[in-house]
Image (tube, rainbow, N blue to C red):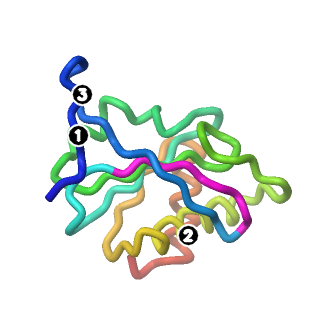
């Protein structure tokens, strides 16, 4: 059963916001919505943005589980104390996949988010 609720006054789907702690120690914010079984779409925003960047887009993919993440230092996620290497941002995505125990994912990224998606995919090709 999908874990999504609709805000009747706005007439739109809303996602549940949650947090998890990455291997690098930051508490990261994410929104989770859609059908739990099957493929999960992970949406990664660009520089100086937040998971809200994808509002109005992810709702068109309600047949999938949709997970949007605030990368460190953006939106509701804590900033990274040290190290801003792309590989570390890729680790955050891998940590999210493992935290949610996802089996099949599609990584979607805009700008910096695209580079983060590629970094994560190189380290986790089986997904």
Q: Is residue 22 magenta?
A: no
Q: Are marks 1 and 3 in contact (CB under 8 Å)?
A: yes
Residue pointed to by mark 1: 5
122 on left or right of 26 = left
Residue 9, image x, y percentages: 22, 17
- Between 91 and 22, the residue placed more toward the observer is 22
Q: Quadrant of residue 87?
A: bottom right
Confirm or deny contact between disc 2 and disc 1 (CB under 8 A).
no
Q: Is residue 19 left or right of residue 72?
A: left
Mark 1–mark 3 distance (CA, rounded to whole Å) = 7 Å
Of 2 and 62, the residue lying toward us: 2
Give the structural element (helix, strand or loop) at label 3: strand
Question: In the displayed structure, does residue 10 sit left or right of residue 89?
Answer: left
Q: Quadrant of the N terminus?
A: bottom left
Image coordinates of residue 11 in percent, x first then y, are 19, 23
Q: Which residues are magenta?
A: 24-32
Separation of residues labelled 3 and 2 (CA atoms): 30 Å
Taking the spot 48% from the left edge, 71% from the top edge, the residue there is 99
Q: Residue furthest top?
A: 9
Badge 1: residue crowd in 10 Å (few <14, some 14–19, many ≥20): few
Return the disc, 2 or 1, that comes first in the chain's sequence.
Answer: 1
Q: Which residue is mark 2?
A: 95
Local crowd at mark 3 within 10 Å, few (<14), some, or many (≥20)?
few
Q: Residue at x 40, y 82 (%)?
A: 126
The secondary structure type at the circle numbered 1 is strand
Between 59 and 2, which is closer to the camera in this rendering?
Answer: 2
Tag 3 residue: 7
What residue is drawn where x is 24% and y is 63%? Answer: 36
Is-magenta flag for residue 29? yes
Q: Residue furthest right?
A: 82
How far apart are the two marked residues, 2 and 1, measured between alpha carbons? 26 Å
């Amino acid at each position: 059963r999908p874990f999504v609720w609709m805000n009747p006054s706005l007439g739109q789907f809303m996602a549940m916001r949650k947090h998890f702690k990455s291997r690098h120690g930051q508490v990261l914010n994410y929104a989770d919505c859609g059908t739990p079984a099957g493929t999960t779409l992970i949406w990664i925003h660009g520089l100086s943005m937040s998971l809200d960047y994808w509002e109005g887009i992810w709702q068109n993919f309600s047949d999938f589980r949709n997970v949007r993440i605030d990368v460190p230092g953006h939106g509701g996620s804590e900033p990274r104390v040290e190290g801003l290497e792309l590989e570390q941002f890729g680790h955050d995505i891998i940590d999210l996949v493992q935290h949610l125990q996802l089996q099949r994912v599609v990584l979607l990224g805009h700008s910096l988010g695209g580079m983060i998606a590629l970094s994560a995919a190189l380290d986790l090709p089986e997904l």
